[in-house]
Image: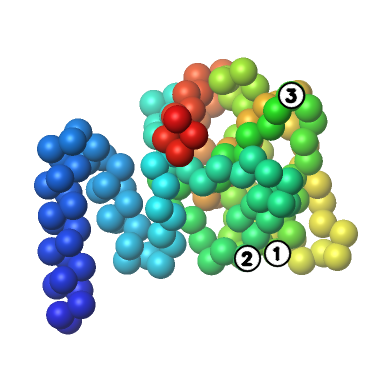
Amino acid sequence: MRKRAFLFLILVLAAAILIWRGRAKNFVETALDVGRDVVTVSEDQIKVGDDVFLVEIADTSEERTKGLSGRPGLAANRGMLFLFDRPDLYGFWMKDMKFSINIIWIKENRVVGITEELEPDTNPNPKIYYPPTLVDKVLEVRAGVVRERNIRVGDEVIVSLIQNQ
């Protein structure tokens, strides 16, 4: 009980500081995830249409191969953003996944395709999913998020990378 009270006090103090600095939205979204055991501390963001997601960046071969594999889940306001140096038909699989996802295919800061409700794949030769056209970014989010947030092909995408500025 004391530990939770202390954590709550820290969160309230941090919220006050962030509000003062104009960054309360990210803090509130992060604080809401604490109780879910799916905490990703990152302020990198991607805006798709009118919706903002806090993202982890996968921009190395190793990070891209692992992706979200092995994780227990993902909060609705979180995602993994795969960044590529050049547009191509990059393939994605559901190997070792423990939850379903939606894939948002992006080229030149526009949604060019969406693949919904991909289920975990235990097959030794997992199915590989490809975009409908060349892409330079791919966003993975929890299954159902595309439908819930009404994300559509053609939506504008804005990426804000705090860590790399």
The residue labelled by disc 1 is 96
Helix, strand or loop under label 3: strand
List x then y, in percent, for residue 8: 17, 65
**What residue is at 41 percent from the left and 59 percent from the top?**
39
The residue labelled by disc 3 is 87
Contact, mark 2 vs mark 1 (Cβ under 8 Å): yes
List x then y, in percent, for residue 9: 13, 64
Mark 2 nearby-residue class (10 Å; few <14, some 14–19, many ≥20)? few
**Is 116 in front, or is 45?**
45
**What residue is at 63 percent from the left and 34 percent from the top?**
83
**What residue is at 65 percent from the left and 60 percent from the top?**
69
> Of circles 1 and 3, which is in front?
3
The residue labelled by disc 2 is 70
Q: Is residue 102 visible?
A: no
Q: Kindly report the distance in space between the C-alpha atoms of the residues bearing marks 2 and 1.
A: 6 Å
Ranked by sequence position, the earlier of labels 2 and 1 is 2
Mark 3 nearby-residue class (10 Å; few <14, some 14–19, many ≥20)? some
Q: Kindly report the distance in space between the C-alpha atoms of the residues bearing marks 1 and 3.
A: 26 Å
Classify residue 89 as left or right of residue 104. Answer: right
For the residue marked with disc 1, what is the amino acid? Answer: Asp
Ranked by sequence position, the earlier of labels 1 and 3 is 3
**What residue is at 73 percent from the left and 46 percent from the top?**
61
Contact, mark 2 vs mark 3 (Cβ under 8 Å): no
